[in-house]
Image: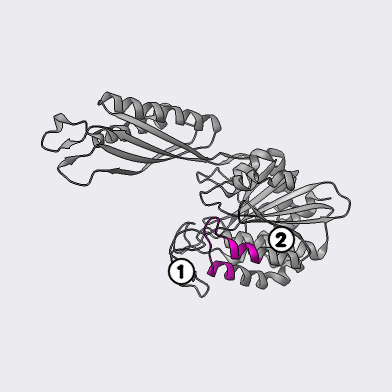
Amino acid sequence: MNTMVIPAGIAEIEQEMVALRHRIHAHPELAYEEFATGDLVAERLREWGYTVHCGLGQTGVVGQLKLGNGTRRLGLRADMDALPIHETTGLPYASKLPGKMHACGHDGHTAMLLAAAKHLAREKSFDGTLNLIFQPAEEGLAGAKKMLDDGLFERFPCDAVFAMHNMPGFPTGKLGFMPGSFMASSDTVIIKVIGRGGHGAVPHKAVDPVVVCAQIVLALQSIVSRNIAPLDMSIITVGAIHAGEAPNVIPETAEMRLSVRALRPEVRDHLQQRITEVATGQAAVFGARAEVDYQRRYPVLVNDAAMTALARQVAVDWLGEDGLIRDMQPLTGSEDFAFLLERCAGSYLIIGNGDGEGGCMVHNPGYDFNDACLATGAAYWVKLAQTFLV
């Protein structure tokens, strides 16, 4: 990234914010345990003049700054939680807590938003209300929904809300935008097959739930290929099957665990219907019974077209077309920012974490957020705030 495009105020505090990121990285906290991280965020925001509210979503923090007479209200969100992964990077600031690490870059997201917060408070270069949302528990435990349930938008109304996530595999610091469905829904399905146990030597006197599971696995593959339109992305992954303990005993029950994803809400609904029908139908064929626990977790993340166009234009005006990730495509991962976008217009964007050799994807024990994109991300938040709050 050309340092000439980074505002002087951001460049001035870049190393301070990198050090802050390293501090957070070394002390990762899992979902709803972000006490020290939240305290650190709150302390800095208060120091810079924000009104700080703690405890939304259990460990969430919201910093609010009102300037001028403007009536527009902007929300910017960063996630704070780490993952239950043992870090293997060997970095000087690697996790000091075995089995916990910032393997998704939330330490970087928090540091980018804090850098923007400091600069905006110092420059006072907007007119309106800025709500900075530091969210817990993005990694599978729906911290965004928890904050909403605790009255996030009732207490801190926003006319638009935005979030940014780093993404390995894209050039460092380049920004990616896409209107409409951008990230997949994520549902968990637990199928319990109840058969009749017996001795492995006399299988005809039992109803083998393992055989039923095998048939269900094969039948599930036909849903994507034969029940969903070819251009509609859908994924059914059977990640676990648990049954029995001994080689000569047919167990009474077996359990399957599925991950199900889609990029359209109506496809998500259809997948639920067909998975339930296939599991119960296949079990019945063999004289068994299937109980389907369908857990709808994260919805499809849908970016508002107008807000995405605005967010993209801010980047183009600042960096030009060369600063963008070209031909951005939907992502099959999931993100609980989708809950906020169901309640408020906004957009979720990507910042490249680097595409060179030696890098690795998020949720990997060797991953690290790329500090080279921290200033760009912070500066983008500043530009967006200054554009929206006028």
Disc on res. 143:
none
Residue 227 falls in image quadrant:
top left
Pinpoint residue 333: horizontal percent, then vertical percent.
51, 46
Pinpoint residue 100: horizontal percent, then vertical percent.
47, 63
Q: Residue at point 71% right, 42% down?
A: 307
Mark 2 lies on residue: 379
Q: Residues within 10 Å of mark 1 (few under 14, many from 20)?
A: some
Pinpoint residue 387: horizontal percent, then vertical percent.
79, 51
The total number of labels drawn is 2
State which region is magenta: 22-40
Inspect the image, locate mark 1, and give the three-letter code of the amino acid beneath it: Thr
Horizontal side of residue 117 vs 328, given as left or right: right
How far is disc 2 from disc 1 in space, using C-alphas? 28 Å
- Quarter of the image with the N terminus in it: bottom right
Pinpoint residue 370: horizontal percent, then vertical percent.
56, 64
Q: Residue furthest right?
A: 69
Horizontal side of residue 127 vs 269, given as left or right: right
Disc on res. 89:
1
